[in-house]
Image (cartoon, helix red, strand yellow):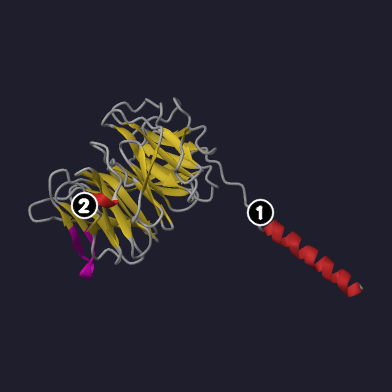
Amino acid sequence: MNFILFDMRYSFLILILLASCSKVSKPIVFTSVEVSEVYTDSLSIRAIEIMGNSLAFAANKGTFGTVDLTTGKVRANIEKYHTTIPQFRAVAHTSNDFFMLSIESPALLYKTGKNGRMELVYVEEGEGVFYDAMTFLNDMEGIAVGDSIDGCLSIITTSDGGATWFKTPCSQLPVGIEGEGAFAASNTNIVTVGDEVWVATTSGRILYSSDKGKKWDVYTTPLRSNEPTEGIYSIDFYDNQLGVVIGGDYTNPNNASANKAITKDGGKTWELLADGNAPGYKSCIQFVPGSSGKGMVAVGFTGISYSSDMGLNWKELSQDSFYTLRFQNDSVAYAAGKNRISKLVFK
């Protein structure tokens, strides 16, 4: 009997310890941000990726490179294609390789090759060719999206680690809206979670695939998209259910009506956030890691805005201008914009 009593007390103690260990610490609420420069040049930098202790970037003027986040050392180079100087606005990476994709015809997709040089793995030429964003689902499978051609969005995929890329025919994609595309503003028109893919368009639509881009559904959002400069500029998902989109009109950046929305069912339905309240136009939005989906940071040439309550209320933390943002951890991020890449420390 004593043994049984001891065993019960021991089991109860274990349950208490497990319960105390499983408590999630309350996410930090930011009140300010410290901005410091890590790289400056006369470039428009709209695409960055954090790769371990390095930040990779690609920009206009054919320029690409890395920043060592430990030492601050910058390595930059220029890629030319015959007499063409590519304008890069999309990058991605796997465990082994870095990829960069240019926008207009000829669209040029490069991956890291031998001897530190970039290897051209995909070329697309023609009227209307314009690529906007790319990402990888895993080390073998990647996807990139571009503007509509022949009635559907341009989507290319790889399944061999980026060595070869193939364009998805319109017969396998949703019917497009005339003039529909994606804004090449921050390389955040695509987001993936596991096998699932979401693509946000200039028409305020979401293309969704549950199987890595083989089959697609279309969802609508309430974001305004009546003008060519309006629509969704950026999308992010915290998990496969909670997602957020932001946009607006860069020609009228103070207009904050119908430019932010949230989904809690994987993108099927969306509700407007802080409708009519700042922030207005932003080109990139990202969830704060470890915030349980409550923390969001949005950047644009108008500054840095932050929400700690899942987008219901926002605070401007800085008027520093950026195009795109990536978090390194729950309080440090890197942002890129006109002529610079900066480190952001949120406090």
Identify the secondary structure beneath mark 2.
strand
The residue that appears at 21% across and 52% down in the rendered structure is 63
Q: In front: 330, or 282?
A: 282
Residue sitting at x 23%, y 53%? 169
User: Against 110, is 27 above or below?
Assistant: above
Q: Nearer the viewer, residue 264 or 249?
A: 264
Region in magenta = 110-122
Q: What residue type is labelled 1?
A: Lys
Quarter of the rendering containing residue 297: top left
Instruction: Specify the amino acid type for callout 2.
Output: Thr
Number of numbered discs on residues: 2
Q: Quadrant of the N terminus?
A: bottom right
Element type where label 1 sits in the image: loop
- Marks 2 and 1 sit apart, C-alpha to C-alpha, by 46 Å
Residue mark closest to the camera, 2 vs 1: 1
Indicate which disc residue 63 carries.
Answer: 2
Magenta span dominant secondary structure: strand
Q: Position of residue 202 (x, y in %)?
A: 30, 37
| Residue 115 is one of the magenta-drawn residues | yes
237 sits to left or right of 111: right
Tell me, yes or no, if residue 37 can be seen here. no
| Mark positioned earlier in the residue sequence (2 or 1) | 1
- Pinpoint residue 71: horizontal percent, then vertical percent: 37, 59
Q: Which of 192 and 80 is in front in this view?
A: 192
User: Is residue 212 rendered to the left or right of residue 25?
Assistant: left
Residue 225 x %, y %? 32, 31
Q: Quadrant of residue 150?
A: top left
**Mark 1 crowd level (few <14, some 14–19, many ≥20, 10 Å Cα):** few
Q: Does the magenta stretch include residue 215?
A: no
For residue 23, the mark is 1
Q: Residue at (47%, 32%) from the top-left corner?
A: 273
